[in-house]
Amino acid sequence: MTVSLDTLAQLSGGRVIGDATVEVSACGLDSSRLPEGALFAALPGTRVHGAQFARDTKAGAVLTDAAGLDLLTEAQETRPILVVEDIRAVLGPISAEIYGHPTRELTVIGVTGTSGKTTTSYLLEAGLLHAGHSVGLIGTTGTRINRTPVPTSLTTPEAPTLQELFARMKNEGVTHVVMEVSSHALELGRVRGTRFAVGGFTNLSQDHLDFHPTMEDYFQAKAKLFAGEQAAERAVLCIDDEWGERMRGVAKSAGHEVTTVDTQGAAATISARQTATEATGAQEVALDYDGANFTFRLPLPGEFNIANACLALGMATAVGEDPAEFLSGVEKVAVPGRMERIDRGQDFVAVVDYAHKPAAIAAVLDTLRGQLEGTTGRVGIVVGAGGDRDSSKRPIMGAAAASRADLTVVTDDNPRSEDPATIRAAVVEGARDAAPQGDIREVGSRARAIDEVVDWAEPGDAVIVVGKGHEVGQLVNGKTLHFDDREEMARAIGEKLAGTPHRDTLGDAKE
């Protein structure tokens, strides 16, 4: 479909410089990839204004602000220009209009919070597919339609890409879309123009303080999914932490229907507890949903995953799913890089997890320690911190690891443009402050660090590599080098079992 600039001007409160009858059929931020007949959104950037790239695009019109208009006028731009006060504030609604408001015909379920978004999304996907729906998934591990990957970037894509993706899903017969909604997306308005049937909140802990000035700012960004113009129609909230309780107040004050989830013994709509565990970490869970009792097998370890499963159930039933049928689907879930066991026949437990913030590291280590309860098994961890991100959490990550593990190997994560040694030093400092007598080692090469923890492991121990999970790249000085923790863990275990030495070059990140 096509939409006239005049219609978009009325929608956004903007004005058109040039021919307002010109119609556009697509929208985007990448000047080099837009086709003729598209609308180029020229946003202000941290270094340059996007309007400077208008000459590179075949788009038929430009959306920009007053500063962008000055640059376009100076460049003698002849195409029509839609000028608005705040581009991000209107880009979502404009994109939704161009792509035909696809979410009006989709059941969109949004999940936000610090940890657990991906796992909760996969639980929802598994349960909804089992119930017979056609399901789209958008999140950290990528985008999928009925489990078939669709190339995208960003946890929550920019508004034009997101609305185009929704339109594609609708055209391919998708009925339900499950998506992770990041705090960045909410703060930057990427999901404006999206109709959320229900929103879910997992938890909140320190993360992204390089983007949000304080934890309160971080909370208020998440709260946009439960109050205001980006809010979901219904809310399902985990109240296991104080932030969940606060979010309940936000959602109720906004007049939304609220379902609560608890695994700590507080009164809630949905509550659950573990009743048995298996050697694999799978759990039997007893669940109470508003007085109705259910028992199901959760193939994921950890109390936090019980909370994620309850949250997924609450969101599914909020859009009309049968609890028992949904839980049958949950029993088949597998989440890449989330407490993912690497088994090559070794006599110790080996796990890879995406945990990259202090609370998540603490949770996965407590889970591993719990699986060894009643044994003499030890716990070892490989941990690092990313560059060009919140530096204040680095020593806290080190402390969370060293205070719980018998061996802490500090290594590189994604150093990006920073000096890796400086990042490691901050993590090591926190680790040594928390465990002065602990076994704390620093190994710059991530592959060598994995070798270290695997070689240390004895029968009955458990080792975990955290930080990257499903990722298959390491970001170093502007380059993405191939690196997969799961591959490296399997390699290191295989070499240990075979009694062969670790080769110097094997497993190093490669372009």
Image: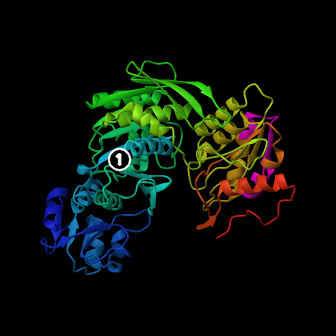
Q: Provide residue 129's location: percent of width, then percent of height.
A: 40, 46
Q: How is the image coloured?
A: rainbow
Q: Nearer the viewer, residue 17 or 195?
A: 195
Q: State whether residue 479 is above or below residue 376.
A: below
Work out whether residue 154 can be spotted. no
Q: State whether residue 257 is above or below residue 480.
A: above
Side (left or right) of 207 relative to 86: right
The boundaries of the magenta stretch are 431-453
Magenta segment: does it hold 451?
yes
Magenta segment: does it hold 390?
no
Query: Which quarter of the figure is the C terminus placed in?
Result: bottom right
Query: Which quarter of the figure is the N terminus placed in?
Result: bottom left
Q: Provide residue 260's location: percent of width, then percent of height.
A: 39, 27
Disc 1: CA contacts within 10 A as few (<14), some (14-19) or many (>=20): some
SS at mark 1 in the image: loop
Side (left or right) of 363 relative to 168: right
Q: Provide residue 69's location: percent of width, then percent of height.
A: 26, 70
User: Which residue is depicted at the point 69% across and 41% down?
Assistant: 398
Q: Find residue 17 and report its image quarter.
A: bottom left
Task: State the residue position of label 1.
Answer: 133
Q: Provide residue 420's location: percent of width, then percent of height.
A: 69, 57
Q: State whether residue 396 is above or below residue 506.
A: above
Q: Amino acid at mark 1?
A: His
